[in-house]
Amino acid sequence: MKPLKSRQQNLWGFIFLTPQLIGLLAFSLIPVLFTLSLSFMKWDGFGAKEFIGLANYIDQFTNPDFWKALVNTAYYTVLVIPIQIAVSLAVAIALNKIKGKNFYRLFFFMPVVTSSVSIGVIWMWILNGDFGILNQVLARVGIDGPMWLTDTKWVMPSIAMLSIWWGLGYNMVIFLAGLQGISRSYYEAADIDGASNWQKFLHITLPLLSPTTFFIAIMAIISSFQVFDQAYVMTSGGPAKSSYTFVYHIYESAFVDFNMGVSSAAAMILFIIILMFTLFQFKMSKRWVHYEDQ
Amino acid sequence: MKINDVQTKTIPNQNVSLSLGKRIKPTRILLHVVLIIGAFLMVAPFLWTVSSSLKDMSQIFLIPPKWLPDPVTFQNYPNSLTAMPFDLAYFNSFYITFIVVLLNLLTCSMAAYAFAKIRFFGANVLFILFLATMMIPKQVTMVPLYIIMDNLGWIDTHLSLIVPAGLFNAFGVFLLRQFIRGIPNELEEAAVIDGANPLRIYWSIILPLIRPALAAFGIFAFMGIWNSFLEPLIYLTSPEKFTVPLLLNTFKGLYFTDWSLMMAGTTISVIPVIIVYIFAQKQIIEGIALTGSKS
């Protein structure tokens, strides 16, 4: 064999890389640096830019909208992540060794393929306080349902509820793939030792599934910090900003208030929060994620 | 339970009646009941949407509600189609998604091939850059991208949706690189001896071998673009250029109180997707599982 000379390697490497490299520079790296520089400026998007140092960042901490957005997003994340992971894992385990797995899978995954806007409109009707089907079903069993989307207390749990329904199938499918990667021999050995189903779950399934759980947890936290579509479509962030999320804050600062500097500073803070959470999870993962080949 | 299954499969003739008796455990039946209820709850919102779309104004606000429309009225469908150009939105969404997915498959596999098989200057640094950008939430680049699109004159054109999404997909590069790395070098070395250049190797050896990965990534990319909302919301202003999610959002804003009409519009936005899903569910679900488990 005659390997390519290193100059040729360089040439071919860059030929193949060029389209995505242009995309990386033009639509990701340069924009991020642009956001960073805008976060130190006062700019309405049209006129002259004015350098104002850290004022946009300081503004965030005295801005009630920022805190509202942060608290709402954190609340949403706390509601969605544990329930979604627990339920999708339970469904995945139930489906893993059952007859008709593909039949059930078809239904559980169905919401995943539909768009956030369609989902939002469907649930606006279901959760309608006066005529929505959910409150009418609840009334049948004697529960007086709340005004889900127009009550400041219930709007975030409502959005969390539909997000759990929406994302359940995705996580379930990833969990199923993870479960199928666990060798049967572990369970057979445990059966010989007379282990109960619960013991097998605790000492075989959970540890060996931990890389999958880790992946799902990371993806779920990143995406729940970015929640926007549902709140925008269903409640416009209301009532009284009680479903105003972090991305909503970034969006509204830029495209409603035309305050690009404030929006960019908020975006950088979101980036840092997500980065820190992800790094923290990676650090913690050494304690609970178990890789089989180690 | 597992052991029982194995035994009945491997030793079929021994104690058939006993193993049959063991198989139909009450816990199994209970599990099926729970799963059927769960599956119903997953689909119920869609069924309720369709049922509501087939009601007229006099039925939609009934308390207690009617589960099924009686009489069935189809009038909401022609009404939504004349109220909003859903056909145009479908055309827009389809061709935008189609081009973006094609661009993604081509350019991501090219970059992935370079990273996996060619030892070029700066490969490691560039690959780390690609990985690092996966960490950037797309909202962080929202404002600069708007300004870039504005300077290019691409606001309110489909180019603003096609070019950035088509030319940049770090996840795709990473995913396909994982697959291409798994291809043994001997295959290419044989081709090099035959005088093939990297372009030929990429096109006639690598691409055919990673077809399952391309299909999985294509499905993943398709769903992302088809359902994206934030980008069309920011870039597009003319209703005839809207994608399906954006059009449905406008529709919702205009006919907010006419629930049966809104449910017909929503059904129009959902049903074609669900039909495609039902026919291709195996490929879609396994594709999604593959993209998840490989990363």
Image (tube, coloured by chain):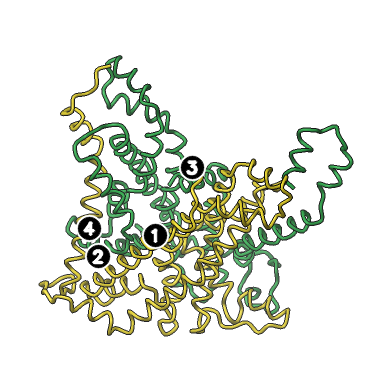
Chain colours: A yellow, B green
Mark 1 vs mark 2: same chain?
Answer: no
Secondary structure beneath label 4: helix
Q: Can you identify the residue that label 4 sits on?
A: B149
Q: Which mark is residue A293?
A: 3
Label 1: few (<14), some (14–19) or many (≥20) C-alpha neighbours in 10 Å: few
Quote the CA–CA distance across marks 3 and 1.
Answer: 19 Å
Q: Position of residue B292 (x, y in %)?
A: 47, 48
Q: Nearer the viewer, mark 4 or mark 1?
A: 1
Give whichever of discs 2 and 4 has the lower sequence position. Answer: 2
How many numbered callouts? 4
Q: Residue at x 16, y 72 (%)?
A: A40
Q: Can you identify the residue that label 2 sits on?
A: B143
Quote the CA–CA distance across marks 4 and 1.
Answer: 38 Å
Secondary structure beneath label 2: helix
Q: Position of residue A121 (x, y in %)?
A: 51, 68
Residue B9, compared with residue B255, is above or below; it is above
Amino acid type of the residue tagged 3 in the rendering? Asp
Choose between A70 and B106: the one closer to the eye: A70
Query: Disc 1 is attached to a residue of which chain?
Result: A
Q: Which mark is residue A54?
A: none
Left or right: A38 with respect to B233?
left
